[in-house]
């Protein structure tokens, strides 16, 4: 139990770090701060956690050979990103990211630029950063690691269930946006009707502006709002 939670806390930390990196990266590119990144509702992106865990556990023996560590980190991260993209597209029938506009890309799922950044990130994490993280985690008692790890693990599991259920109820409509960028127009339309939806739907709408909510869910939401208003009046 302790070993699993110790490993999970590393995974969680790198997932949060990945979320922060995504926020900074997107802010620099779009010049607009956005917190709607990733598949889950919380401030963490598991793909970064998985990539980091693989690197620090299997590439640590190459930490003294920076070139080999860089190349292997790039390969590991690109493979994780490629197959994650493929899996999510198979499940949700939606391309969650696309690098078709980048040079030297593979099916739009991975690209050379990101691969180089992953390689550099893997090198820094494996050789320099992870030893510090291990020292930090080792400073806590076994009981603390298990308790904190269990709470965070439960949060991510619950988040995964809620996010998956929510997205499965959304009707994706992206065909007419394949060859043009209508993001700003769609975001404006979505923003005008956000008050109709719960916090979970708002989070999904911000992350994916090209979606339409299933009609049945809209009707259910409107019914619940009307019921609440009538209930307040009666009181």
Image: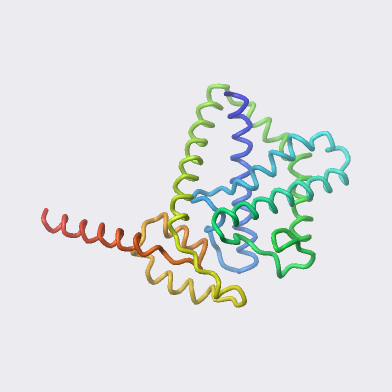
Quadrant of the rendering where the N terminus is positioned = top right
Which of 8/163 is in front? 163
Look at the picture and state if 166 lies above or below 174.
Answer: above
Relative to residue 222, is residue 21 drawn left or right? right
Relative to residue 65, is residue 220 drawn left or right? left
Q: Residue furthest top?
A: 142
Relative to residue 235, is residue 221 drawn left or right? right
Image quadrant in which you'd find residue 28 = bottom right
Look at the picture and state if 185 lies above or below 194.
Answer: below
Q: Which residue is at 16% across, 55% downward?
A: 231
Residue 115, position as x, y percentages in the image: 77, 55
Q: Residue furthest left?
A: 234
Residue 118, position as x, y percentages in the image: 75, 52
Colour scheme in use: rainbow
Which of 4/23 is in front? 4
Q: Which residue is at 88% across, 40% downward?
A: 65
Image quadrant in which you'd find residue 226 = bottom left
Residue 140, position as x, y percentages in the image: 59, 26
Q: Which residue is at 59% across, 40% downward?
A: 12
Relative to residue 189, is residue 93 drawn left or right? right
Q: Which residue is at 38% across, 65% downward?
A: 194
Which of 109/147 is in front? 109
Residue 71, position as x, y percentages in the image: 84, 48
């Amino acid at each position: 139990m302790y070993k699993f939670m110790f490993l999970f806390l590393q995974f969680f930390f790198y997932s949060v770090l990945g979320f922060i990196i995504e926020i900074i990266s997107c802010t620099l590119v779009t010049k607009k701060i956005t917190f709607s990144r990733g598949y889950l509702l919380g401030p963490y992106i598991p793909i970064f956690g998985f990539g980091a865990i693989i690197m620090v556990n299997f590439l640590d023996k190459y930490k003294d050979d920076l070139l080999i560590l860089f190349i292997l980190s790039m390969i590991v991260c690109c493979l994780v990103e490629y197959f994650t993209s493929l899996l999510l597209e198979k499940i949700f029938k939606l391309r969650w990211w696309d690098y078709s506009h980048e040079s030297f890309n593979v099916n739009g799922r991975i690209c050379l630029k990101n691969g180089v950044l992953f390689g550099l990130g893997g090198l820094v994490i494996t050789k320099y950063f992870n030893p510090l993280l291990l020292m930090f985690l080792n400073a806590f008692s076994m009981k603390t690691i298990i308790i904190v790890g269990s709470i965070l693990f439960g949060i991510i599991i619950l988040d995964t269930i809620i996010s998956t259920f929510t997205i499965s109820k959304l009707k994706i409509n992206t065909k007419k946006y394949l060859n043009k960028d209508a993001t700003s127009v769609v975001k404006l339309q979505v923003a005008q009707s956000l008050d109709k939806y719960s916090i979970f739907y708002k989070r999904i709408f911000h992350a994916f502006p090209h979606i339409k909510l299933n009609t049945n869910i809209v009707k259910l939401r409107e019914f619940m709002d009307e019921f609440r208003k009538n209930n307040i009046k009666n009181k």
